[in-house]
Image (cartoon, rainbow, N blue to C red):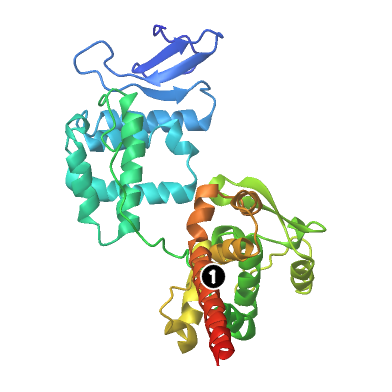
């Protein structure tokens, strides 16, 4: 497929290349100085010059070509952020990527992407090894950006492949002990009490708990959108007792189950901060050696189901997660079950020994 002269009626800069696909549709690319030694990487702009995003991509691409040195990480990141792939990301994901881009650019802004090796990836990972989750996320973001760079001819391979992630105790994935959950239900303000009930009943994150309302309820469960899966629609069945509890709150229509003390909707960060502040005010929770987070309610839901004998596949279907993550969340329930089984075996053996002892007298 060859580039053609610009045939659109739109007033496009000379660096825009048009390519006609087999279906007759015209696609546009920013390809300044094409065919010369100074040519940059081609940036896809889309196929609709009437789309405002088309012009945003073009504007960003033009800024990139006038800015960072070609082939560097600064140029790659600038180009990636001018791409449709960046536009497709959720705002929260963009913020996370921006944070990791900042970490990378501090040490590698002017480094050629083609020069980075696997040992360099390990060095970047190990520099923040005291925060395993941060280190692993940095490797993950590097994998995304380097995989993306291959098709843009920055390099021919992805050096992050085979890089091992650090072992870590995933933040917030420990289930809540019953005594903690019971304490919250008895003593927490109404919005946090409802959060605990909804979190344990549905197994969802704070980003999704904050958006739940009576409008999402069915006769025997709740419809929701899983934000981590790009707002994928999902249905979680609820028990009769859970439905009775939730309906007893008397929340009507499109009103939200969780609101601030001023009656405003929670943001994800505000809900998390509200929980942390209240928890810090209660020594019974603040002094616990277990990290009690909202995310931990997800693990609580998984462990509840595992202890009830539900299979990993069924748990994954109900909560809306992968079977692999179910096993990871349920490890605490598995350890507890194994410990109890060991105790029961010891008690059984002890009863037999006592019976034999009495019988021998």
Q: Residues within 10 Å of mark 1 (few under 14, many from 20)?
A: few
Q: Position of residue 311 (x, y in %)?
A: 63, 53
Left or right of 53: which side holds 301?
A: right
Which of the image's four quarters has the C terminus? bottom right
Q: Secondary structure at mark 1?
A: helix
Is 243 in front, or is 351?
Answer: 351
Q: Position of residue 27 (x, y in %)?
A: 47, 17
Q: Position of residue 115 (x, y in %)?
A: 16, 32
Check the image and name the residue furthest to the right.
219
Left or right of 219: which side holds 30?
A: left
Vertical placement of residue 105 versus 174, above or below:
above
Taking the spot 56% from the left edge, 62% from the top edge, the residue there is: 298
Left or right of 319: which side holds 296?
A: left
Is 62 in front, or is 311?
Answer: 311
Vertical placement of residue 342 versus 119, above or below:
below
Q: Position of residue 285 (x, y in %)?
A: 48, 83
Which of the image's four quarters has the N terminus? top left
Vertical placement of residue 268 versus 187, above or below:
above
Residue 218 appears in which quarter of the rendering?
Answer: bottom right
Is 230 in front, or is 186?
Answer: 186
Left or right of 92: which side holds 163?
A: left
């Amino acid at each position: 497929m060859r580039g053609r002269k610009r045939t659109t009626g739109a007033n496009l800069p000379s660096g825009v290349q048009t390519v006609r696909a087999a279906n007759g549709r015209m696609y546009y690319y920013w390809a300044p100085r094409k065919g010369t030694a100074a040519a940059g990487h081609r940036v896809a702009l889309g196929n609709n010059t009437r789309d405002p995003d088309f012009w945003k991509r073009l504007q960003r691409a033009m800024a990139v070509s006038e800015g960072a040195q070609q082939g560097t990480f600064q140029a790659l990141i600038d180009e990636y952020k001018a791409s449709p792939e960046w536009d497709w990301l959720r705002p929260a994901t963009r913020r996370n990527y921006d944070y990791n881009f900042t970490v990378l650019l501090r040490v590698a802004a002017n480094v050629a992407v083609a020069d980075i090796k696997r040992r360099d990836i390990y060095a970047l990972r190990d520099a923040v090894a005291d925060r395993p989750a941060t280190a692993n996320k940095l490797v993950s973001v590097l994998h995304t950006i380097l995989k993306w760079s291959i098709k843009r001819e920055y390099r021919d391979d992805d050096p992050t492949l085979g890089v091992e992630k650090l072992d870590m105790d995933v933040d917030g994935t420990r289930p809540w002990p019953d005594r903690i959950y019971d304490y919250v239900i008895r003593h927490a303000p109404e919005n946090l009490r409802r959060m605990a009930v909804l979190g344990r009943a549905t197994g969802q994150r704070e980003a999704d708990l904050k958006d739940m309302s009576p409008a999402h309820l069915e006769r025997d469960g709740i419809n929701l959108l899983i934000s981590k899966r790009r707002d994928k629609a999902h249905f979680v069945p609820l028990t009769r007792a859970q439905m009775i509890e939730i309906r007893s709150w008397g929340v009507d229509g499109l009103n939200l189950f969780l609101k601030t003390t001023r009656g405003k909707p929670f943001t994800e960060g505000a809900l998390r901060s509200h929980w942390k502040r209240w928890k810090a005010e209660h020594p019974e929770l603040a002094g616990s050696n277990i990290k009690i987070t909202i995310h931990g309610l997800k693990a609580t839901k998984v462990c509840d189901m595992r202890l009830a004998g539900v299979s990993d596949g069924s748990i994954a279907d109900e909560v809306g997660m992968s079977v692999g993550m179910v096993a990871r969340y349920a490890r605490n329930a598995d350890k507890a079950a194994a410990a109890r089984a060991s105790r029961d075996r010891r008690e059984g053996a002890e009863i037999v020994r006592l019976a034999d002892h009495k019988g021998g007298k």
